[in-house]
Image (tube, rainbow, N blue to C red):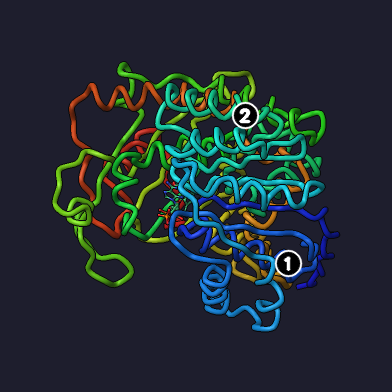
Amino acid sequence: MTVVTVPSSPPVEPFDLVIFGGTGDLAVRKLLPALFHRYADGQIPAASRVVGVAREGLDDAGYRELVRGVLLETGAPEDTVEAFLPQLGYRSLDARKDEGWDAFAELIKEQPEHVRVFYLSTSPELFVDICNRLGHYGLNRGESRVVLEKPIGRDLASANQINDAVGKVFGESQTFRIDHYLGKETVQNLIALRFGNALFEPLWNAGHIDHVQITVAETLGVGHRGAYYDRAGALRDMVQNHILQLLCMVAMEPPSSLAPDAVRDEKLKVLRSLKPIDEANAGQLTVRGQYRAGVAEGESVPGYLDELGGIKSSTETFVALKAEIANWRWAGVPFYLRTGKRLPTRVSEIVVAFKPVPHSIFDAAAGPLAQNRLVLRLQPDEGVKLWLTIKHPGPGGLRLRHVPLDMSFAEAFGVQQPDAYERLLLDVVRGNPTLFMRRDEVEAAWRWADPILSAWAASGEPPRPYAAGTWGPSAAVALIERDGRTWNEDSE
Ligand code: NAP
């Protein structure tokens, strides 16, 4: 295979990035390694500063020590890590108390010409306090931006509360609501495939597409995030944001350009066209499950309730549902969505299944004709496969085979693809919101998700049990098989 080299990107302007929740799991495991990689690639100018903020009583040296350990564990070269660390600082602050904020504001104001990014990597309950204090201490200038991590609220009302409060300090153009799935290489590639090739667009509609599947499967249980997860559940944690964003990228009309609002306007139209799922039809169109003890990756693992410490909970750790988009392009094309914890494989993928050929000219000996499928894999092994029918090579008559045209990015480009956070963090610094959610998108997504949550609550039925290490309750298989279709077996 030809290996294509990827040119490195030019450096961005010097910036100050403050990570509220700078000692948390997301900051340490994702954000700081992402920044380090961009630094190692020469994209972060030396004058830039990254300041971690949390209540823990660390100083600059202690924070650098923490980050050094994390980066070295990932196998990062020691000399590059040492060169990166002086850019890091730390301030111990409580988002809910004024103590220490004066000194913090002075630190930030030392570099008035820098782009300022405030990354709120904390629980959303702190967003309002943090933004109010950023406003009060005069830290929002024109070139400041705020990044909001998901979840933005737990329903439409709470999302509105957060967005209203943030909006009192930061304008919409300064507000970057991150969904890291949109920064994934495969999602970018979906845009390139759909709008950079003449091949797909004529077929990209109800006339030729049979159905779409989106799966986000995790092998892990809730682990130490049980308290957060139990208040959220799979629909709020995965479907309302990541999966709906992926659905939008598949289903949106071609935007007139890649200008931020051109793309986001089209995504919004998709969200607003989703057919409602409510008490009248949730029983037929949704399946929710909760894992019990089982075997995951060869090891016995406890059930969800045991992981929570034996409490009662009707939070779903699995959801499968059949969504439909009520517009001309997609009328009658089901979008089967599923996500869950403690499933057999860690995989995120989009499957676009095309309709069968209208008439087969092959006899039975040739074997069955399978559907063409375009499979976009987001993780692991980001890549794209297009399943085609060909003739089995050699003698023996005309026998048909279903084979993938396979483009694994790591193989084709000979490099490890950058993590989604690397791209998105620098997009924030550059002030490019194309891959971030606008307020009206978040609202439209909640408007669709809220009635599902209400229908489940009204039904009084607990989630269906499934054994850890399986593909969810059997009803999830029935959901798609009732329609004469199956979940993509390649991912299972
Ligand atoms: P986490 O590990 O619990 O970290 C929370 C951070 O917030 C810690 O640094 C904590 O440090 C700080 N903090 C808590 N209360 C504070 C206060 N009053 N003032 C200032 N700092 C405070 O959480 P996480 O997993 O990093 O997640 C952060 C947010 O991102 C959550 O909303 C989560 O849902 C979301 N998210 C996480 C991931 C992930 O992979 N972890 C992925 C997507 C989204 P102190 O206790 O020392 O103050």
Query: 240 or 405, which lies in front?
Result: 240
Please report whichever mark, 2 or 1, sits nearer to the chain's N-terminal start: 1
Query: 40 or 235, which lies in front?
Result: 40
User: Residue 324 location in percent, x, y?
Assistant: 49, 26
Q: How many marks?
A: 2
| 271 sits left or right of 185 in the view | left
Please report the residue visible at 60 percent of the width from the left and 38 percent of the height from the top.
134
- The answer to whether marks 2 and 1 mark residues whose Cβ atoms lie closer than 8 Å is no
| Label 1 lies in ligand 1 vicinity (Cβ under 8 Å) | no
Q: Quadrant of the N terminus?
A: bottom right
Q: Residues within 10 Å of mark 2 (few under 14, many from 20)?
A: many
Name the element at disc 2: loop
User: Residue 173 location in percent, x, y?
Assistant: 71, 31
Name the element at disc 1: helix
Above or below: residue 451 compared with residue 438: above
Q: Quadrant of the C terminus?
A: bottom left
Q: Is residue 129 visible?
A: yes
Please report the residue visible at 39 percent of the width from the left and 34 percent of the height from the top.
321
User: Residue 484 location in percent, x, y?
Assistant: 40, 37
| Real-space CA distance between mark 2 and mark 1, rounded to the nearest whole angstrom | 30 Å
Amino acid marked by disc 1: Tyr
| 34 sits left or right of 311 in the view | right
Amino acid marked by disc 2: Val
User: Residue 423 location in percent, x, y?
Assistant: 70, 54
| 32 sits left or right of 79 in the view | left
Please report the residue visible at 44 percent of the width from the left and 54 percent of the height from the top.
55
The residue singled out by tag 2 in the image is 169
Q: In terms of image quadrants, where is residue 459?
A: top left
Please report the residue visible at 77 percent of the width from the left and 39 percent of the height from the top.
143
The residue singled out by tag 1 in the image is 39
Q: Most extreme residue toward the top, as rendered?
A: 280
